[in-house]
Image: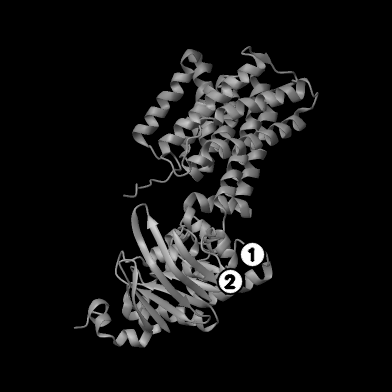
Amino acid sequence: MEQFLQQMVNGISLGSIYALIALGYTMVYGIIKLINFAHGDVYMIGAYIGFAATTYGHLGFFPALLLSMGLCSILGIVIEKVAYKPLRESSRIAVLITAIGVSLLLEYVMMFFVGAEVRSYPKVLTNKMFHIGNVVINTQQIYILFTAIILMILLQFIVQKTKTGKAMRAVSIDKDAAQLMGIKVDKTISYTFALGSALAGAAGILVGLYYNSIDPLMGIMPGLKAFVAAVFGGIGSIPGAMIGGLAIGIMETFVSGYGYSMYRDAAVFVFLILILLFKPSGLLGKNTREKV
Amino acid sequence: MLEIKNLNVHYGVIHAIKDISLTVNAGEIVTLIGANGAGKTTTLRTISGLKKATSGEILLEGKVITNLSAPEKVELGISQVPEGRRIFPAMSVFENLELGAFLRKDKAEIKKDMDHVFQLFPILYDRKKQLAGTLSGGEQQMLAMGRALMSRPRILLLDEPSMGLAPLLVREIFDIITDINSTGTTILLVEQNAHMALSIAHRAYVIENGQIVMSGTGEELAKSSEIQKAYLGGK
């Protein structure tokens, strides 16, 4: 039982990081129907920005978090403008291949500048352990969880209540109709990339704290897992991405916690195959019919 | 108010609109009737900025607006109710109406216009919290019209408002179109239902294969033997 609760705590911390990344996938997919494979690398760059800000800039956790979110949102806007916008009228496969190209570009440009070696994150947070019964929760996990929850609430508020959020939803439902309301589609797409990338930047710092180490290829695996989380939740659905992220995080920690850590990545992708076989629209996704 | 001069529109190599000219004066209801595929919707989409013209001019009160973007045209006072209504099904009725006023900042006036829309379409008030996708076809048409009115347009473009509706409802919708016009909104109405369209229009144009083949007052065209034969089911 204690083992179970402990894994649950670990799983929720990891899952909330996946959820933050998954949100970016799902929002971008919702609005331009693109699986943005470069998203995991934005998260990697967020981790490096956080690393530089805390190691060289001696910033604390929150300033570093905000800096990383800000710079990543700019990076997201630039990626969209440079790589995806010229392909707005092209086939989806062309954009998808471009996304993979952007992903490789970010990984290896980063490697060129910072080297391939793993770096360890500075200790920005005092690491206190809290014992509740025999379950251990540390400060980092609390920070991760609270940061993730606050960001998700903020995101829900932006998407549901603000004018920009309503424009984002309108564009994701029907671009032409949105334009007839006076909504500028390009601007709205930029906002979406900015928001998604800011969340990825936040996730980057959180993961640096959690695992203590970062490297230029760190975005690949969590990026793919967050993608699985987004598919599980129903791609295009924001609450779906949150639930999916938590589910994947918890699943992964349980698989490794009960002694099968060799299989934890495999488990996630087997799960993806099962979703695609039995519920391809995901938990909260809509079944859309292809228009002929 | 709205003037179209020698407009040409292409879809790739297909010449969809061939040298069309038409005028809508302030305060009028003008209808553009024609069969499926004649180019009615393309004409409206070009006016509203969703489709680019290859040549020709569109003028709004003397100002050339030919290939401005759709949002820019909304700002200038052109509002379109698109074919098939195109409401936002996953959003509430209220949110749909709010989006209609997207470019406006005058909160008090928006509220006033919203009340006006609820007055025109009381059923929308009853359903304002409901998701728009759960409305019936007629209610969705009303919502699409109400949403278009929320931008406080100078000219309202209506694309097939009768599509898929029961005859009684069509009557109701057309009465409301007349109401909207009587409060000062100029209307360009595209219809396949020539009978209904001609009955409320001040003037009308007939479009065939992308060309205007006839024009006149609503009454004149309703009486014309060619129109009777081609569009009104007469002999």
| The quadrant where residue A7 appears | top right
- Report the disc number at residue B104: 1
Amino acid under label 1?
Arg
Instruction: Report whether B193 appears left or right of B110.
Output: left
Tell me which chain the residue with mark 2 is part of. B
Q: Residue at x 73, y 35 (%)?
A: A66
Sort mark 1 into few (<14), some (14-19) or many (20+) by Cα contacts within 10 Å: some
- In the foreground, B20 or B90: B20
Residue A224 drawn at (x, y percent):
49, 26
Mark 2: give few (<14), some (14-19) or many (20+) Cα within 10 Å. Answer: many
Q: Quadrant of the C terminus of chain B?
A: bottom left
**In this picture, is A139 found above or below A168?**
above
Amino acid, disc 2: Arg
Say which residue appears at 74% left-offset and 20% top-offset: A127
What chain does badge 1 belong to? B
The image quarter in which residue B223 lies: bottom left
Residue B227 pos. (x, y %): 27, 80
Residue B92 position in % (x across, y down): 52, 59
The residue depicted at 65 percent of the width and 39 percent of the height is A151
What residue is drawn where x is 64% and y is 31%?
A: A201
Front residue of this view, candidates A226 and A217: A217
